[in-house]
Image (cartoon, rainbow, N blue to C red):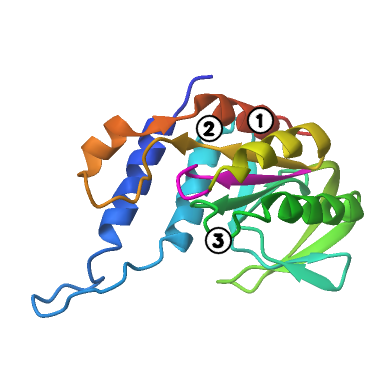
Amino acid sequence: MEYKMTPEEYFKKIIELYHQSRDPKYYNPNIKRGRSASISSALEDLTALFIALNNPNQCLYFTDQPIKFNESTVKYPDIVIQNKNGTIQNLIDVKTDIGWNRSGLYSFCDDWEKRIESIKNTKTTFRLGKEKKIVQGKFSNDIKYHILIISKINSGNQIIKDYAEVKNKLKNVCLYVLSEEIHPNNYEYEINETLEKIKIIKEDFCRLFEYINKTE
């Protein structure tokens, strides 16, 4: 496919986010950061932009949006994609890596498999963060939960097995590994050097957009 923002451009922006996270948000020569700031919110917004630019369909994209599942339970997908007819066909979860859950990724995906099955063809509502406007929606019968792993690094060997099992056994959850060989957050190389050394897995980008670019 032809990209309006390429995977390389997307990764360059991710690498830039990591570099920016090492400095204080407001400059003063006497202020130094210890731990880097979290890039989670910026990564959600960047990923929403990346998808929106490359999706020919007219959709709305809601980041870090609390949304009702089965009227009472509230979940927090990183990105909710709503088609122009109000249908929600794709939910996105973005993970920088899976160092947080190396041994439990398949279980995490399987839990979402059951959760997604339970909300098909059901109505939902959610409230926008800024305007506090209530939005009505309906979950598609073909809704997918897409889990994007930015880097295979820090994920352990179990991810290879989990990746294959999710692909072969689950119908509602799709798992993607977007890069390998070097983590976008490293302290050894500058931005362009990291971009040159990282291996972007373009097959998984293509697979993602095969789903995203379909609408009901």
Q: CA distance from mark 3 to mark 2?
A: 30 Å
Residue type at numbered disc 1: Asn
* For the residues bearing labels 1 and 2, Cβ distance under 8 angstroms: yes
Q: Is residue 154 visible?
A: yes
Q: Disc 3 residue type?
A: Trp
Three-letter residue code for mark 2: Asn
- Is 197 in front, or is 117? 197
Question: Earlier along the polypeptide chain: callout 3 or callout 2?
Answer: 2
Seen in the picture, residue 38 relative to 191 is either above or below; the reply is below
Circle 1 packing at 10 Å, graded few (<14), some (14-19), many (20+), is: few
Which class describes the residues within 10 Å of circle 3: few (<14), some (14-19), or many (20+)? Answer: few
The span shown in magenta is 144-155
Residue situated furthest bottom in the rendering: 30
Residue that numbered label 2 is attached to: 54
The residue to which callout 3 is attached is 100
Whichever of labels 1 and 2 marks the residue nearer the N terminus, that label is 2
Residue sticking out furthest to the top: 1
Evaluate if marks 3 and 1 touch, with contact meaning CB atoms under 8 Å apart: no
Give the labeled residue for mark 1. Answer: 213
The residues bearing labels 1 and 2 have C-alpha atoms spaced at a distance of: 8 Å
Q: Is residue 96 above or below residue 127?
A: above
